Amino acid sequence: MSSDQAGSAETPRPTVFLSYCRADQARARMLAQALEDAGLQVWWDTLIEGGAAFAKTIEAALAASDAVVVLWSAQSVASDWVLDEAARGRDLKKLVPLSIDGTESPLGFRQYQSITLEQAKGTIAPASLQAVLRAVMALAGREALPRPPAAPVSPAPADAARRSLLIGGGTIAVVAAVASAVGWSRGWFDSPRGVGESRRIAVLPFENLSGDPEQRYFSNGLTSEIRIQLSRNELLQIAGQTSSEQAGDGRKDGRAIARALGVDYLLGGNVQKAGGRVKVAAELTDGATGLSRWADSWERPLADVFAVQSEIGAAVAGALSAAVDGPDASGASLVGGTADVAAFDAYLHGRALYEAGIDEVSDRRALEYFERAIALDERYAGAHAARARALVVIGNLYADHDERVLAYESAEAAALAATELAPDFAEGFSALGFARASGKLDMLGAREPFERSHALAPGSADVLARYATFRSNLRDHGRATEVILRAATLDPLNARTFRSQGDIRHNAGDHAAAITSYRRAIELNPTLAGVNASMGFAQLMAGADQDARAAFLKERSAVRRLPGLAILAHRAGDRAAAEAALAELVAEYGDKSHYQYAQVYAQWGDAEKALTSLQAAWDLRDGGIMLMYADPLLAQLRSTDGYLALAKAVGFT
């Protein structure tokens, strides 16, 4: 089955951005619930008038939505927030105006026919809801809903009929979690949660009280291990590591942190490691009130640090009324973990270096630490998975051809070892997918492990981001978009997540939305590697050549900057400048950048040279090949025999 065929069976739910003012919150809540029950995905915000803290996230959510539903009322027509959001929805040509009290749309919006939203006995009247659904479905490019029958319809059958129409037959379970940071902050879950409802929690960096800055890696590692353990619980949604660390920096007011991350609860604490003992204190804070819900502390021999992790996870789950199944609840060691303190220590050192991503020296030192951890405990699945990822990075960035091939073989073997040692360890399967797709360039072989990783850890932002990127590279744009939105929800302050979201939108041909995502990534981290070039390529494909040139000139990486400048110069008719940029690229990178040469030649309209370069990239196992199937810069080649044969060889088809 082709990736296009695979993607068609997994069409994401239409997304609605709900704009309203605080005075109309009760009606907004009622409408949001009705839309969710009908199978739509809703983003809304009870803090809409509370200031500009969410302004950038709201902008991204508006751009990502299929429809912007605005509740006009006597109060909302005077709200600057609602007016701004309505204007954005109008400009994006996806405005659905509703009147909830008979108020006429304000000037500037009266060319749009408002839908009168009527209530009946505390629920949305079926005819009104059907009208809203028809408008949203049309904007989402889905089949319109039929008009309701004249006779009254009981609520249960009507909901079932809408659900059946929305998914093309059959039934689905509507997920209660909202897929954006905006949605999580909207106050939908002020009332006590019932059994089976997800709790959203951020694990903030545990403070290092050891008095030794060199021990910071240990407190950070312990924090990450606790976060990983909690993410295995399907009843918990865990904010991503990067966002949690950024939001928790400086220990500002807990309620402000919870609002920034869109979570219900915060878990924080401190770690003191001295001699052969470790002291850990943890506290669970209610994000809405800032009050402590639970606190505890442990002092144990260092060998029992793993038991401390498990106890914290089990205690938090209990405090949130979310039962944990499996070994985590019993205090056993983590899936994929180790009982060897020295191995754990080496692993934490390696992970700190790997995540820093400084240079070749630090990446190779990280690999040494992971290998030391494995030497101390050969059954340490987490260390095997980390070793696999490090080997792929080293092979891609620093190795010559012979070392690269060996690195990729070793990476696959390490990832396979992780999955065999811990069959329920999501990171192991994610590492295996990564090693096969980004290393061995085996897109077919990467599918099963990536799917398995997603099934095992649907609440892990890192696992979701890798999986979404993989689905995007297969041109499964619907699935990729759905998953990366969930990752952005879990990690709303992580620039890398928004860069990935931009890549996914760029691959799907929505270059305007990609630009929005890249801009958000740059705002979060202006030094993020490659993001300016990504912005430039999206602007180039959108026809904004001057903006693209400015973006490329900001890019520090020549291998990303020069192809963009070569394409722009050729498009402007300056053949000499175009040839000069390409010559500079070839002189600096030689056989390491055949994929970039293919991009340039394809955009120059020279299909023969583009295909020759693409074949050379494949022969040399250039990591760029994993991008070829969805890359908009190569779209002109997709119908050629050479391209189709290569796509099949790589495993795309």
Image (cartoon, rainbow, N blue to C red):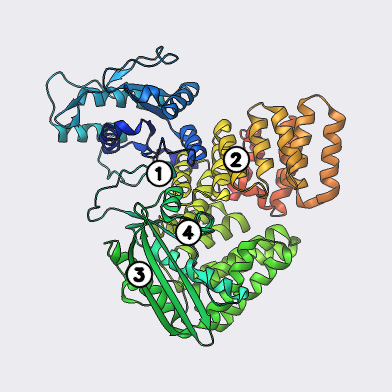
Label 2 – label 4 distance at C-alpha: 28 Å
Tell me whether circle 1 and circle 2 mark residues in contact (CB < 8 Å). Answer: no
Residue furthest out toward the top: 111
Residue of label 4: 449
646, 562: nearer the viewer: 562
Instruction: Please provide percent x and percent y for residue 120.
Output: 16, 27
Residue 323, compared with residue 281, is above or below; it is: above
Residue 518 numbered mark, or none:
2
Q: CA distance from mark 1 to mark 4?
A: 24 Å
Amino acid beneath label 4? Pro
Q: Earlier in the sequence, mark 2 or mark 4?
A: 4
Left or right of residue 114: residue 384: right
**Badge 3 or badge 1: first in the primary sequence:** 1
Residue at 46% from the left image edge and 72% from the top image edge: 336
Helix, strand or loop under label 1: loop
| Of callouts 1 and 2, the N-terminal one | 1
As measured in the structure, the alpha-carbon distance from the residue carrying label 2 to the one carrying label 3 is 40 Å
In terms of secondary structure, where does tag 3 sit?
strand
Q: Position of residue 221 (x, y in %)?
A: 52, 70
Crowd tier of the residue under label 2, counting other residues whose Cα lies within 10 Å: few below 14, some 14–19, many 20 or above: many
Which comes sooner in the sequence, label 4 or label 3?
Answer: 3
Q: Which residue is mark 3?
A: 295
> Badge 4, how many Cα within 10 Å: few under 14, some, many 20+?
many
Asked if one can make out residue 383 in the rendered structure from this viewpoint, the answer is: yes
Which label lies toward us, 3 or 1?
A: 3
Give, as a three-letter code, the residue at label 3.
Ala
Residue at 76% in and 61% down: 400
Q: Is residue 3 above or below residue 288?
A: above
